[in-house]
Image (spheres, grey):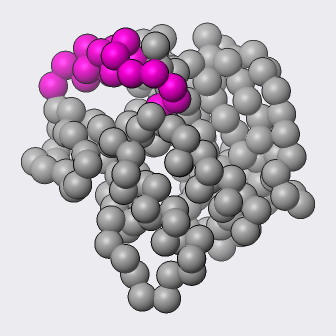
Amino acid sequence: MAKLIFAMNVSLDGYVDHDHKDMMPDKVLFRHFIEMTKGIAGSIYGRRLYELMQYWDEDQPGWSPEEREFAQAWRRQPKWVVSRTLTEVGPNATLIKDDVEAAIRRLKDELQGEIDVGGTVLAHWLGERGLLDEVHMYLRPVVLGTGRPMFVGPRPPMRLLGSERIGEDVIRLRYGAG
């Protein structure tokens, strides 16, 4: 049975912002994300984050070797996109429009390993239905003051499973959901 894991960079004041310069991963954290992406069974995205991540579908001029490595790992993994508005998705992706809960439960039952959950709204929805297994917060020493909160509703019940330092200034907090 697969585990669904919601993992995001988060500021000290609880916001996620992929575009803020202070939230960009350094080399050590980016290496961590490359290795994580290589090892997961796939990813489930909400529409907004999937559209942002599609950047990795096409090689970009000036990419570093690490960016190319991440793109290759991301392209290889299966992706499921939960959206009522999209009509199609890119390579190695499956659109989930209807009966989302049943489709996610099937993925959990049929796959082995970890499935990354991308998107705060989707993670909240999955958590409300008891489908989210873990929350990983990559705590960054940044105060944003505004943006999208990591938790779009009441924080789900969580228990600390562990923590680790990644690089100079990032702490990954692992929580069991539920």
112 shown above or below 165: above
Q: Nearer the viewer, residue 1 or 21?
A: 1
- Give the quarter of the image for residue 90: bottom left
Q: From this viewpoint, which residue is outermost toward the left?
A: 87
Q: Quadrant of residue 5?
A: top right
Instruction: Write the residue at 19% across / 51% down.
Output: 89
The residue under the point 43% across, 54% down is 74
Q: Position of residue 114 (x, y in %)?
A: 52, 29
Above-or-below relation of 25 to 46: below
Task: Tally the numbered discs.
Answer: 0
Q: For this view, does 55 lie left or right of residue 116? A: left
Examine the image and state in which quarter residue 97 appears.
top left
- The reply, left or right, for residue 168 in relation to residue 55 is right
Residue 107, image x, y percentages: 33, 21
Q: The C terminus is located in which quarter?
A: top right
Query: What stretch of residues is rendered in magenta?
Result: 98-115
SS majority, magenta: helix
Residue at image position (67%, 35%) is: 136
Residue drawn 83% across the image and 34% down it: 163
Q: Nearer the viewer, residue 110 or 81?
A: 110
Q: Is residue 152 at all visible to an observer of this figure?
A: no
Seen in the picture, residue 92 relative to 100 is either above or below; the reply is: below
Q: Is 10 positioned to the left or the right of 83 in the image? A: right
**In the rendered structure, does residue 146 fall within the stretch colored magenta?**
no
